[in-house]
Image (spheres, rainbow, N blue to C red):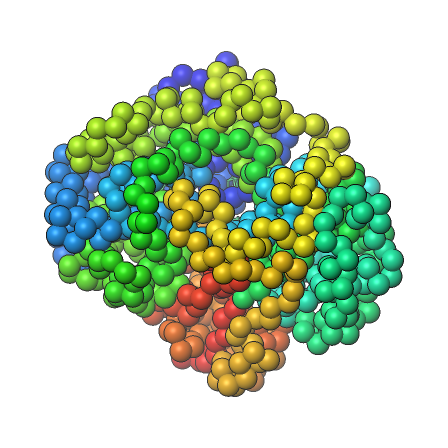
Amino acid sequence: MTATIENTGAVRAACPQDCPDTCAMLVTVEDGKATAVRGDPDHPYTAGGLCVKVNNYLDRVYDPGRVLFPLRRTGPKGSGRFERITWDEAVDEIATRFRAIADEHGPEAIMPVSYLGTQGILNGLNVGDPFFAKLGATVAERTYCDSGSCTAYAMTIGDTAGVDPESLVHSRFILIWACNVMSTNLHLWPYITEARKRGAKVVVVDPVRTRTAAAADQHIALRPGTDGALALAMAHVIIAEGLTDQAYVDNYTAGFPEFAERVEQYTPEWAEGETGVPADVIRTLAREYAGAQPSVIRIGVAIERHAGGGQTVRALSCLPGLVGAWRKPGGGILQLPLWAFPVNWGAFMHPELLTPGTRVVNQYLLGGALAGDLPAGPPIKGLMVYNSNPLVTCPDQERLVEGLRREDLFTVVSEQFMTDTAEYADIVLPATTQLEQDDIMFSWGHLYVTYNHQAIEPLGEAVPNTEMFRRLAARMGFDNPLFRRTDAEMIAEAFDWSHPHMEGITVESLKEQGWQRLNVPSPDEYAPHAEGGFPTASGKVELLSSAAAGGNFVVPLFRQGSNDHQPGQPVDPLPHYIPPRESAAADPELFARYPLNLLTPKSHAYLNSSFANHDFHRRVGREQAARLHPDDAAARGISPGDPVRVFNDRGEFTVVAETDDAVPRGVVVSSMGGWRKHSKAGATLAAVNPTVFGDLGNAPTFSDTLVEVEIV
Ligand SMILES: Nc1nc2c(c(=O)[nH]1)N[C@H]1C(S)=C(S)[C@@H](COP(=O)(O)OP(=O)(O)OC[C@H]3O[C@@H](n4cnc5c(=O)[nH]c(N)nc54)[C@H](O)[C@@H]3O)O[C@H]1N2
Ligand SMILES: Nc1nc2c(c(=O)[nH]1)N[C@H]1C(S)=C(S)[C@@H](COP(=O)(O)OP(=O)(O)OC[C@H]3O[C@@H](n4cnc5c(=O)[nH]c(N)nc54)[C@H](O)[C@@H]3O)O[C@H]1N2
Ligand code: SF4
Ligand SMILES: [Mo]
């Protein structure tokens, strides 16, 4: 625990949350206790500010509700009754039970469930992968977030970082598409404000007038899930009206003639029928987007959450190539610049430990899996959850609860708090917070590597995830030395340090400085595709995708290093429109019963379901609610403040009604993240979301959800 900055007593840290901003934090420590947390004023992106979620992170660290010791269940599952046990007892019991399950049913009867409670390279996404691969457990496919978008993006322009967010100051036209920047990507907003000062126009495409849409120059409120129609109609106008940058198209795109022929059918008049956006508005949008160069499209993760999300991202990734937006800094598409970081994923996943052919189950299907709805192989008898709260973040909540109640299921949960999921555990293991551990961070929202120094001793007997898996591996008798790697050894393996982007960056320099920009051109000069050079098979923007022949795949990052379980369905190599699955047009009978489209965006005050247990955050985030247009509320006799039941054939949840004309007619908005134990009737919106995947990358389809709302 070195690393206090001279004369200040502050420790350089990094926000661990699953958020694109990865803020650089400074932690003040006095007598071994953290007394203040603030944003690093010198970090270009964080610029001294954190956010409403993390400003009072110390209240989370020192919350009396922290799980600080290993616990064993004493009451019925879900009762929340536990007794304290020692780490030795906990690890013994887990090893004994896992071994017994593997002996009786085969190791695939054990399944891990994890996601991004922390984003650290050490303690985050892949921390348990080698352990479960060695065990031979069912491979958990993790496509919660951006897997459909990434697949589509990579199919079209390759795994490029795209536009540097800091270059947005140079953009002349900023098209924010399905992204509520002011809540979910807060630190991007100052760059957008600066661009506007310099004359840029900002347009937001979102069914709802969010705080971001309200702050923009123009808000285009389309019907949920119809984005593909709007994007393809933009391409139609750009080509039909000769607004392409033809030299860029000729030199740096592949398949233009086929693409042009394909989009002929997607006229603005046709798109108006799908999206509800007037054809004239679509024409003007396309003209302004093409004409104001450099233009940029910032896509949110929410873009993928419907049946045709993948093809929508395909179409959107084609647009910058058509208009030559890539020629200048601030032009192109911004998705996840994480691809610029040469993270040494292999050193954390260790895919070579997997037994080829091991069963893969997508975590979204956990409710079904626990009910026995599985591909071949044994029933799930052992479950280990870490870095995740699936009872809130997975669909099919009712079946999931039933599954977790099964007496013959042995469940381990590693947590900082007694979450809805942890309450169903047989054994709960205490996890450290970011202040109690070392880690090293990439970012999916900017181009800086950040080091997180441990600031304080772990509270109670909490341990980092790395240490938990060291202890479990030792007790399981896994003798491969990789299971004994120290955190320092893992940090040394975190990146491919010889990659050109890491030039001038070492573990030592990061420890000293806290954060460093990747060795890439400055935001004023960052235009990696000014002359093509896309990391696709052809090196071009693949309007006609050569990767599509390989089928509907999931990029390796989203599964546990294994690529031999792909669905492999061939995909149309040209972008096309796939309408929402649950809509008036697609399913009139369903629509007659459930005429409202539920959207479940991120909460302003929570980070997924994290922080929803703190009173302060719940005061800011308010009660779990359903927001409707006043006309839709009136038609149902609903007044603001009424308790309402939101339901469909899959399930129901009860919340308080709010009316708001920012929500269009026919849509109901309920922010995700609230816990079941704080809900009115023991269920949250995850009870009504579908378990059907979108068209690419096994992405979830949360926005493709029809419901009805009635007063309770
Ligand atoms: N405050 C806060 N910040 C967060 C998070 C959080 O929980 N809270 N979570 C983090 C994570 S994990 C992620 S993935 C990102 C997500 O970041 P975003 O993608 O910005 O998050 P969302 O709020 O889910 O969705 C953004 C907007 O998409 C709209 N939307 C929904 N469906 C559609 C559609 O079909 N078409 C269009 N055009 N718009 C649609 C919603 O109305 C919403 O306003 O945020 C990260 N940052
Ligand atoms: N309806 C609906 N559902 C959604 C979404 C949506 O928009 N709508 N969004 C989806 C998306 S984009 C995402 S990313 C997922 C997020 O899903 P999850 O990753 O499950 O997110 P959280 O609910 O925040 O759960 C993370 C848990 O990890 C714990 N944790 C934090 N740090 C540590 C640690 O160091 N060790 C251990 N062991 N635990 C730790 C936290 O306390 C928290 O309970 O949700 C998805 N679910
Ligand atoms: S949650 Fe996001 S915006 Fe808030 S401090 Fe962490 S990285 Fe920054
Ligand atoms: Mo996410």
Question: 562 or 481, which is in the foreground?
Answer: 562
Foreground residue among 563 and 510: 563
Quadrant for the N terminus in the image: top left
User: From what the image shows, is residue 684 above or below residue 516?
Assistant: below
Q: Is residue 389 left or right of residue 584?
A: left
Task: Judge whether 490 appears above or below 382 on screen.
Answer: above
Q: In which quarter of the image is residue 407?
A: bottom left
**Quarter of the figure with the C terminus:** bottom left
Furthest-top residue in this view: 6
Q: In which quarter of the image is residue 279?
A: bottom right
Say whether residue 418 is visible: no
- Across and down, in percent, residue 194 comes to 75, 40
The image position of residue 550, as x and y in percent, is 53, 53
Please indicate, yes or no, whether residue 587 appears anywhere in the rendered image. Answer: yes
Percent of width and height locating residue 575: 65, 60
Residue drawn at 44 percent across, 74 percent down? 646
